[in-house]
């Protein structure tokens, strides 16, 4: 397209309200504009990148035999009530009423709709397996949308849903999607990792997140330096210590210590002159209305998701002051396991602890010299804490490293969570009615584009991989008022277009510097510069955005040279 | 794709709740399923047809230089308040509140959002003209959604918006879209007509609807048998009669007649033994709170849109009993122009009427022998009625014919309606700030697919044109348990796929009759049947769905033959 005709409003200044580089560059490169909080319009350049990603996703999904559908955005409440998520989903679910005062929501995801469709249409095992996907707009009413299209409220997503007759089939469907996701993100040119993840509000038994590694990423990933183990921070496991003998020190006697106004672990350590690894934190949670005390070592952080999953409850939250004073008979800050009126569950790290400090369940008092068994009982030990860098790998015993990443995809084994809730059954080959085994698989389309920029940019702007670049080539005549420059540019422009190459002709009457800056900012992989001097020698200058390499190419070879470079970039 | 793996739930029975053939066939062919009233899921076969139409639309839009964007579905109320449509749009606008209790709507159209975007990004005439389009999901909360995806609440639409510096530019943009629409609907294989139309709630000065001719169409079109004039029924004009002398009959004296319980035109005619063309109907409307009496001949129908446009009011509705008794001092059913306490406006047809019957503004009384001028005054004459078949063409004086159609596209000249309301200005070459001149252009994507079926089907099912067909070819081995049949089928299947032809292999272990019925129902343009007898002779049977023509083609030629037939179909 001719630059002069494009709707491509680039901006020199860095927008003040953008925190991350992808957001800044998408605004500056005229790819997106904000309409409202967390709601963005895609401008032509931005939407071309989106469509590139969509096309890659489609091709790889189709290759697995998945079939594309298009499900409604506006969904009746009845289905969400059937699955139980109408109440469960909270304020992220954008609810509305139609003119007849019936309840609907704008779909943040489509498990309910697809399960409803499939249960009506699938009767026997002969019709399974099936995998249906769509690329469609979702809405999640995030309380704090941020980072542009990375965490927006309205966003484009590819979501796929598989239905199988048994676990083995479901595992195969999951594997197909896992492999397809790897191909998709490879084609996007990503450095990425698939990490084990928690299933969150989608539910189900097992899931992986696909994380693009980026220092600016919102998410922490954990991976082993020795084996293939990788998980997100919420999920990363700690094994139960085995064959480790406890501290051989003589058990001390428990001793009440007056600790006025000493509440935090830090204060306790300073006051009692002990390390945090000698202190036990007691945190009281309300797990589906039942109070539970969770114990972790003073230098560890409790992982509420692990606690929630371990207890198998729907909702978990820190107990209120009122509940705390009920179970500890003391104000907040002095809770401890001795004499507490609720179940006590302890992190594995406590197994090896002796003579430690706990809260006394009495205002301004702690107890030191405590030991499990003698002073209080623990209902059970479990993995309750976040891993830390350098922790032991739960698979191989190696050492765990941390990295930051951006989640671009997520695959879930749902099991029968939705098929049971919504009664999606089939007649199996043995004539028995069974629930379908489901999986679901998501890719954030806008987020994939943003992650691409996050991972591939420099001080001048975006550096697109050829596969996602909105245009592959930009032709820049240095001065459009010099007829021979413009003519050479037009010739190459026409020739490349004929070859199906996506090309911009920068026909603006602007200084070369302005044009170069814009070309760099919008990140077009190949720039063809046409200047008077090199043209006089029969050459044009071809610059590769990524490497910065500049080459003088004879006019008669430029077409082939560019076509080859584009093809190479697409094949990578 | 292999039929056995497809999610293609065909249905033998005609669904009882479907009124029109496209709705019936889309359900039966497993293209769509209803999720809620006016809300449909597209299944794989249906969505393939949708994507075909989208691709045609994209290609033709891009060819005009229009650029694709993607605007949010969820739109803040502020913009709609700025344009004045938040209050004006009524219940079709699906309103909602987010978690912060802010007002939004789900976009039924995008004039507000695009005007907001453009006013922020366009400063000077050098940046104009621009035409931006998108293909996207809209929602209109229709009170009575019907005919499947033809008039659904949630629907896919291509909408484009043009911005120009002056009327001449706007006219050119309009013309480009008009031409593009013609090409789009030609490529869809339609018999269609562009007809003049009213601008309705979108507003603006001028518009055309693209109507696919179909007996089952919701809309009536009017066209001249002699010239190119065509309009929809709402818009079709009647000229003011010229040079016609009025009835030369001696003016009668007005005479009150006791007409007990005689209210309708039919009752009046029977009671007084006159034709309806001798009676004047008096209809009282409330036009933006002002009562107006509209007079039309007894055998004509008032066209409220014409009346509304003529009076230039925002809202028009029939007056309530209360208003009627205020202006006529009598109950409903006896209103007449003599002594009425509001402005009187008369349809052109009254110009030539003399000695006619009117209501007496008095219960159970009419007046006969009335004449305008002598008995009452008319504020003005205007074109207020619907045309009838056989009426005179407003352009050439020929005779008007009627046909039924389905509106698939609509192009509007908006003028400055939105740019003024939302202050979208630019600096012109003379340094003056001016309002942009806008146009907007819509195509219903799902409706285009439905219209295609409406126009092209037979008793056995859908008859797709090659350009929209979800698959181009279906290969039907008569018996998949005969190895040589299946092998031949697989060979052709693989070969056609390699050529980029979209092909189904019906590998189901079903009777041939079942397979043929399904192939006809889903309307695939070319069926390749592989039977034992013809295969023994080295042939397969190729059937063209549209013509029903069957040809025996030698195995070694079948690939080329099909590729040619497909290419031919696509080129039409």
Image (cartoon, coloured by chain):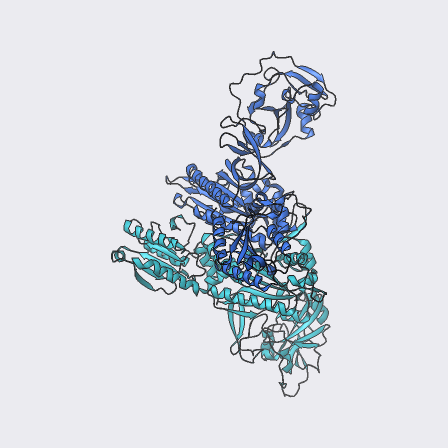
Chain colours: A blue, B cyan
Tell how many labels.
0
- Extreme residue toward the top, this view: A250
Measured along the vertical axis of the image, is residue A392 above or below residue B368? above
| Depth order, front residue of A558/B465 | A558
- Can residue A250 be seen in the rendering of this structure? yes
Q: Position of residue A271 (x, y in %)?
A: 71, 20
- Image quadrant assignment for residue A316: top right
| Depth order, front residue of B199/B310 | B199
- Extreme residue toward the right, this view: A260
Q: Position of residue B536 (x, y in %)?
A: 25, 56
Q: Position of residue A291 (x, y in %)?
A: 62, 28
| Depth order, front residue of A142/B416 | B416
Report the residue at 66% width, 17% height from top: A368
Q: Position of residue B373 (x, y in %)?
A: 70, 82
Give left or right: position of B457 versus B108.
Answer: left
Report the residue at 40% width, 64% height from top: B568
- Image quadrant assignment for residue B116: bottom right
Q: Quadrant of the N terminus of chain A?
A: bottom right
- Image quadrant assignment for residue A534: bottom right
Measured along the vertical axis of the image, is residue A199 above or below residue B214? above
- Can residue A436 be seen in the rendering of this structure? no
Measured along the vertical axis of the image, is residue B279 above or below residue B251? above
Measured along the vertical axis of the image, is residue B474 above or below residue B296? above
């Amino acid at each position: 397209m001719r630059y002069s005709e494009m709707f491509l409003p680039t901006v020199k200044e860095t927008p003040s309200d953008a925190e991350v580089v992808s957001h800044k560059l998408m605004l500056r490169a005229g790819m997106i504009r904000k309409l409202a909080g967390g709601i963005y319009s895609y401008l032509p350049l931005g939407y071309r990148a989106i469509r590139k990603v969509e096309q890659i996703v489609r091709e790889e999904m189709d290759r697995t035999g998945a079939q594309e559908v298009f499900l409604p955005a506006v969904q009746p409440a009845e289905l969400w009530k059937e699955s139980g998520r109408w109440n469960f989903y909270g304020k992220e679910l954008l609810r509305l009423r139609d003119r007849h005062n019936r309840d609907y929501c704008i779909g943040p995801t489509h498990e309910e709709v697809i399960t409803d469709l499939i249960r009506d249409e699938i009767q026997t095992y002969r019709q399974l397996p099936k995998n249906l996907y769509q690329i469609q707009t979702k809405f999640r009413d995030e309380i704090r949308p941020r980072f542009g299209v990375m965490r927006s409220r309205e966003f484009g997503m590819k979501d796929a849903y598989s239905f199988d007759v048994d676990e083995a089939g479901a595992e195969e469907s999951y594997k197909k999607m896992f492999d397809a996701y790897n191909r998709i993100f490879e084609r996007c040119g990503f450095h990425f990792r698939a990490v084990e993840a928690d299933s969150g509000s989608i539910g189900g038994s097992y899931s992986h997140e696909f994380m693009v590694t980026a220092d600016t990423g919102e998410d922490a990933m954990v991976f082993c330096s020795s084996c293939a183990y990788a998980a997100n921070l919420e999920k990363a496991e700690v094994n139960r210590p085995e064959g480790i003998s406890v501290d051989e020190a003589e058990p001390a006697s428990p001793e009440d210590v007056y600790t006025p106004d000493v509440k935090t672990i830090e204060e306790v350590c300073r006051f009692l002159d002990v390390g945090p690894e000698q202190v036990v934190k007691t945190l009281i949670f309300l797990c589906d209305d039942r109070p539970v005390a969770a114990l972790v070592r003073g230098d560890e952080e409790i992982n509420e998701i692990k606690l929630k999953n371990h207890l198998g409850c729907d909702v978990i939250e820190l107990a209120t002051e009122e509940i705390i004073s009920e179970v500890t008979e003391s104000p907040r800050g002095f809770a401890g396991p001795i004499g507490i009126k609720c179940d006590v569950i302890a992190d594995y790290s406590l197994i090896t602890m002796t003579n430690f400090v706990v809260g006394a369940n009495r205002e301004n008092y702690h107890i030191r010299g405590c030991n499990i068994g003698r002073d209080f009982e623990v209902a059970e030990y479990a993995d309750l804490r976040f891993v830390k860098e350098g922790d032991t790998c739960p698979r191989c015993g190696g050492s765990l490293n941390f990295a930051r990443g951006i989640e671009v995809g997520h695959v879930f084994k749902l099991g029968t969570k939705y098929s049971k809730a919504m009664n999606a059954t089939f007649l199996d080959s043995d004539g028995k009615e069974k629930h379908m085994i489901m999986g679901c698989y998501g890719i954030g389309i806008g987020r994939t584009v943003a992650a691409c920029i996050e991972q591939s940019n420099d001080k001048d702007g975006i550096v697109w991989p050829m596969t996602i670049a909105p245009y592959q080539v930009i032709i820049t005549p240095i001065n459009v008022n010099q007829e021979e420059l413009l003519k050479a540019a037009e010739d190459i422009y026409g020739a490349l277009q004929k070859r199906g190459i996506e090309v911009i002709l920068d026909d603006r009457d602007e200084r070369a510097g302005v044009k170069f800056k814009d070309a760099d900012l919008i990140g077009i992989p190949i720039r063809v510069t046409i200047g008077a001097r090199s043209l006089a020698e029969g050459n044009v200058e071809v610059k590769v955005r990524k490497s910065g390499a500049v080459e003088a190419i004879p006019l008669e070879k430029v077409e082939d040279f560019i076509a080859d470079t584009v093809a190479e970039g697409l094949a990578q």
